[in-house]
Image: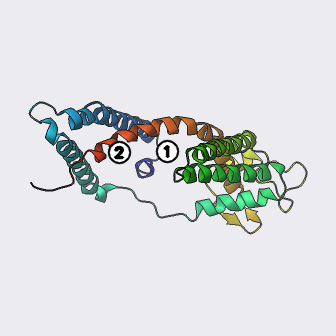
């Protein structure tokens, strides 16, 4: 997705339209492929289809997918000489965490987010650990505790990301209300390098960090959706359990 987005110049109106079309095609290609996979390929694996008998269903279902993947890789690699490739611009996540670290010393919200993230990590650990526990009662308690910790972490983290005025606050850089001048930062967007200046995080780095924090609440709320969505992969696990692992007679 990132490579595709890099092929367009946002300052060119035609490229902007083409970029929107690219992401639309990308989205529909994935969903149409998923529909064919779950709607037809999975059924062919278990019941056969046309000239393909049921006993060879799994073989041909994986063979068709392997052929499609090979064709896709061939087309992708065949056009590699025409791609626009940009060199890495530095440690973006390192800069993001540096902005957070500077903000942490002057904001309560930063500490609340830290508690929320730790709570989510604990919830994930309890949930995964419970899968390896044979005792049903203990397994259930670990699962409930893990869900509760994750829910608390999502609420704490998401709640503090709705308002991002706390991001970039630092006694070393600002005085008074320590608000970032968004208009000035916008004017400097094309002139300033992403990273750190001599006095700490640059204004663009702070602005980018704010934008990232703002999108976290909807991302965190999508956790329940992805839990349900990921259950579809259970079909593939069920298929693999029915495969004949022997070659030949």
Q: Which element is circle 1 on?
A: loop
Residue 65 rendering spot, x and y as whole percentages = 24, 45
List the residue tagged with mark 2.
237
Between residue 241 and residue 203, name the one nearer to us.
Answer: 241
Residue 108 at x, y percent in the picture: 83, 50
Could you say which is closer to the camera, residue 91 or residue 86? 91
Q: Secondary structure at mark 2?
A: helix
Quadrant of the image occupied by residue 200: bottom right
**Label ID, residue 109:** none
In which quadrant of the rendered image does the C terminus lie? Answer: bottom left
Residue 49 location, quadrant: top left
Residue under the point 29% across and 30% down: 39
Q: How many marks?
A: 2
> Relative to 149, is 34 on the left or the right?
left
Is 84 left or right of 170, judged from the image as shown? left
Residue, far bottom: 198
Q: CA distance from mark 1 to mark 2?
A: 42 Å
Taking depth in this image into account, of 65 and 60 the one nearest to the observer is: 60
Residue 15, compared with residue 209, is above or below; it is above
Q: Is residue 49 visible?
A: yes
Residue drawn at point x = 21 percent, y = 54 percent: 245
Percent x, y of residue 102 = 77, 60
Residue indicated by mark 1? 10
């Amino acid at each position: 997705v990132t490579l595709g987005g890099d092929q367009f110049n946002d300052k060119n109106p035609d490229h902007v339209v083409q970029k929107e079309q690219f992401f639309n095609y990308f989205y529909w290609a994935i969903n149409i492929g998923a529909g064919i996979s779950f709607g037809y390929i999975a059924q062919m694996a278990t019941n056969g289809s046309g000239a393909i008998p049921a006993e060879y269903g799994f073989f041909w279902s994986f063979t068709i997918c392997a052929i499609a993947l090979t064709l896709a890789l061939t087309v992708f690699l065949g056009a590699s000489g025409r791609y626009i490739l940009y060199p890495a611009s530095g440690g973006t996540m390192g800069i993001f965490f540096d902005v957070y670290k500077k903000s942490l010393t002057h904001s309560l919200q930063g500490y609340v987010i830290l508690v929320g993230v730790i709570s989510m990590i604990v919830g994930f650990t309890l949930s995964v650990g419970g899968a390896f526990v044979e005792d049903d009662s203990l397994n259930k308690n670990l699962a409930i505790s893990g869900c509760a910790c994750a829910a608390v972490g999502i609420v704490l983290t998401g709640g503090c990301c709705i308002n991002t005025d706390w991001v970039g606050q630092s006694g070393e850089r600002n005085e008074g209300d320590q608000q970032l001048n968004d208009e000035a930062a916008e004017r400097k967007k094309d002139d300033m390098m992403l990273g750190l200046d001599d006095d700490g995080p640059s204004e663009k780095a702070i602005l980018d960090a704010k934008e990232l924090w703002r999108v976290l609440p909807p991302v965190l709320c999508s956790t329940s959706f992805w839990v349900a969505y990921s259950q579809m992969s259970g079909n593939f696990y069920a298929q693999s359990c029915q495969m004949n692992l022997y070659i030949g007679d």
